[in-house]
Amino acid sequence: MSNRVATAVAASTSAPTSPETQVAFVGPGTLNPSTIPVIVNAQLALVGASSVTGVTVKIRRGNGITGSILASMLVPVAGAVSEPAALGYVDTAYDGTGYSLTVTAAGAAATCGPGFIEAQPLQGSF
């Protein structure tokens, strides 16, 4: 039995310039707050448009765009090309609120997906 929980991001999901947008949330599921650390991974395809210069991808603690930023990266996306993004974080202070994957485009709106966010305790049954 695995303690992994994951949520998919559909292809062609909107990545607007503002506000920062949550594209996926992975809830506590079978994760146990006493079973820390938790490994959080996210992978996402990013697709630009003519005026897009990049897309910021973040993993946040909790459900939404206001939780603590655990990992962040700006992926340059020039024009209508697809670029991969991959983030990871080892959370040694897991509090049972889950994790959000968010995006914000620069220059113009972009799209993202397919992709996913997943969380799995480092200890416990794998």
Image (cartoon, grey):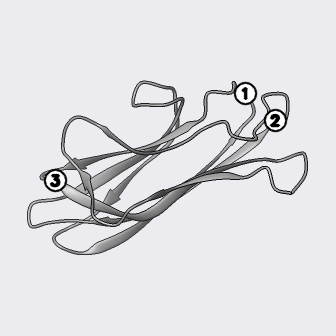
Image-based side of 99 in relation to 31, left or right: left
| Position in image of residue 64 (x %, y %) | 42, 31
The kind of residue tagged 3 is: Ala
> Between 79 and 60, which is closer to the camera in this rendering?
60
Q: Tell me if I can see residue 43 in this picture.
A: no
Task: Spot the residue most to the right.
Answer: 124
User: Crowdedness of circle 2 by 10 Å Cα count: few (<14), some, many (20+)?
Assistant: some
Residue positioned 16% across, 59% down in the render: 52
Query: N-terminal of the two: label 2 or label 1?
Result: 2
User: Crowdedness of circle 3 by 10 Å Cα count: few (<14), some, many (20+)?
Assistant: many
Q: Which dot marks residue 1?
A: none
What's the CA distance linking mark 2 and mark 1? Answer: 7 Å
What's the CA distance linking mark 1 and mark 3? Answer: 34 Å
Say which quadrant the N terminus sits in: bottom right
According to the picture, the residue beneath numbered tag 2 turns out to be: 36
The kind of residue tagged 1 is: Ala
Numbered disc 1: secondary structure? loop
Residues at circles 2 and 1 in contact by the CB criterion of under 8 Å:
yes
According to the picture, the residue beneath numbered tag 1 turns out to be: 93
| Position in image of residue 32 (x %, y %) | 80, 33
Residue 76, picture quadrant: bottom left
